[in-house]
Image (cartoon, rainbow, N blue to C red):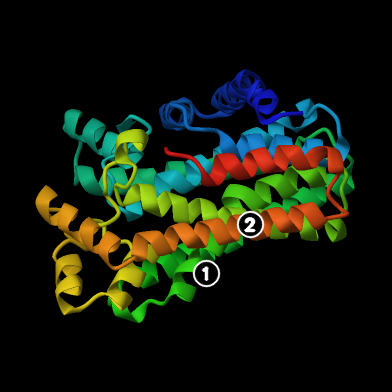
Amino acid sequence: MRLEDLFGYLPRLEAELRASYATARRAAPPTVRPFLDVNQEFTLRGGKRFRAVLVLAGYHLATGRAPAPAIGAAAALEHFQSWMLIHDDIIDHAEERRGGPAVHRSLAATHRADAALGSSDDYGVGVGITVGDLEEPFTVEALLGAPAPSAARLAALAEYVLMTRLTAYGQLLDIRNGTLDPGAVTESDVLRVHELKSAVYTVSAPLKIGALLGGQRPATLGDLEAVARDLGIAFQLRDDVLGAGFDADESGKSPNDLPEGKRTLLVVRAWSEGNADDRARLARVLGRADASPAEVEDAREVLRRTGSLAYSERRIEALTRRALARLDRSRSIRASGKPLLREIADRLVRRRS
C-alpha cells in the first residue's frame, strides 16, 4: 500500500467526522447545538489530515490489510488536532487558521455583532477554550468505538493518554521558553519541546494508535516509535524553517514565527553564533508584532549569515538519515510496510507547505 492509497480514504474520514458531529448535535440541548456547529465548521474547514493518515498507516503496518477499520480512530486524531489548534490560537493570539478566522476571534465577532453584554474578546477566549475542550469527548468516543478487541482498544487509549500528557508537557515548556532570553534557551531545550509536542502527537502516537488497534503488541513498537520520533522532530524543524519565511514562494507562508517570538532552533543557534549586532537585529523583531517587513527580512538575513539556517537543514538531514537507518535494520516492522514509511518520511521532511 502506498501513501496515495491512504489519502484515498479521506472522503470516508470526512463522512465519519460529519457523522460524529451530527450524532452529538441530536443528543445535545438545543441551546448548546450552535457551539457544536462551531466545532464542526472548524474541523471541516480542512487541513492536511496527515495525522489521520498516519493512524491508517499504523493499522496497515500492523496487519498488512486495508485500514478501513481504523477510520474512526483516524477521525479521533482529527478531533484531537482541532482541540490543540483552537487552544494554540488562543495562546498565540492568532487571527486566522485554515483560511478563516481563529475560533476565538470568530466567537468574539459574533458576540460583538449581537451586542451581547460583557467583553467580546473575553467571551471569545472563554468559549473558545471550552469548545476546544469539547473535542476531547469526540476523541475518546471514537477510540472506544473502534472495531477491535478490547485489549487493543485499551492499548490505544493508553497511548492516547500518554500522547495528551506529553503534548501538554511540550506546550508548557514551549511557553516557558518564550519567556526566556534567547541566549538562555539551548538547542536541547528546543529539541525537547519538539520531541514532546510535535513528534509525539504528529507522528509517533498516530502511527502507534493505528498499529495497536491492528493488534500489534506495545512491546514490539520500539523501532516504530524511534523512527517516528526522529521524523517528528525533523518535521518540526522543517516547519520552523517554513515559519521563518524560507521557501515562502513555494509554501505560501509568511515569516510569522519571528514576530511571534518563537524560540526556534533557527533563533537559538543564530543568537549563539552571531555577534552583538546580529543579536540586536534579531531582538528588534522577536516578539514584535509591529516589526516592519524590512526588519523581518533583516532578521532572516541574520539566520542565513550566522549559518543557523544551514545548521537546521543539517539537523533535519541527520535525523532523517538516522530514522531511515533504524527502519532498514528493524525486524519488528514489516518489510512490506517499509516503503510506505519511507514515503511518509519524505512527505514529512521534504514538504514545502
Q: Does residue 261 appear left or right of residue 195 in this picture?
A: left
Q: Quadrant of residue 215?
A: top right
Q: Amino acid at mark 2?
A: Arg
Q: Horizontal placement of 148 versus 239: left or right?
A: right
Q: Secondary structure at mark 1?
A: helix
Is residue 219 visible to us here?
A: yes
Dot 1: few (<14), some (14–19), or many (≥20) neighbours within 10 Å? some
The residue type indicated by label 1 comes to Arg
Q: Nearer the viewer, residue 142 or 44?
A: 44
The residue nearer to you, when weighing 306 against 296, is 306
**Rendering coords of residue 194 (x, y %):** 51, 61
**Residue drawn at x 67%, y 22% as measured from the top left:** 9
Instruction: Answer whether labels 2 and 1 touch (C-beta < 8 Å).
Output: no
Q: Pick the quarter of the image with the C terminus.
A: top left
Expressed as whole percent of the image width and height from the top left, the position of residue 44 reads 48, 26
Q: Which residue is mark 1?
A: 192
Residue, disc 2: 321
How many angstroms separate mark 2 from mark 1 (CA)?
A: 19 Å
Local secondary structure at mark 2 = helix
Q: Residue at x 25, y 38 (%)?
A: 108
Q: Residue 282 location in percent, x, y?
A: 20, 66
Depth order, front residue of 280/100: 280
Count of numbered marks = 2
> Can residue 138 be seen here?
no
Q: Residues within 10 Å of mark 2 (few under 14, many from 20)?
A: some
- Which mark is first along the chain, 1 or 2? 1
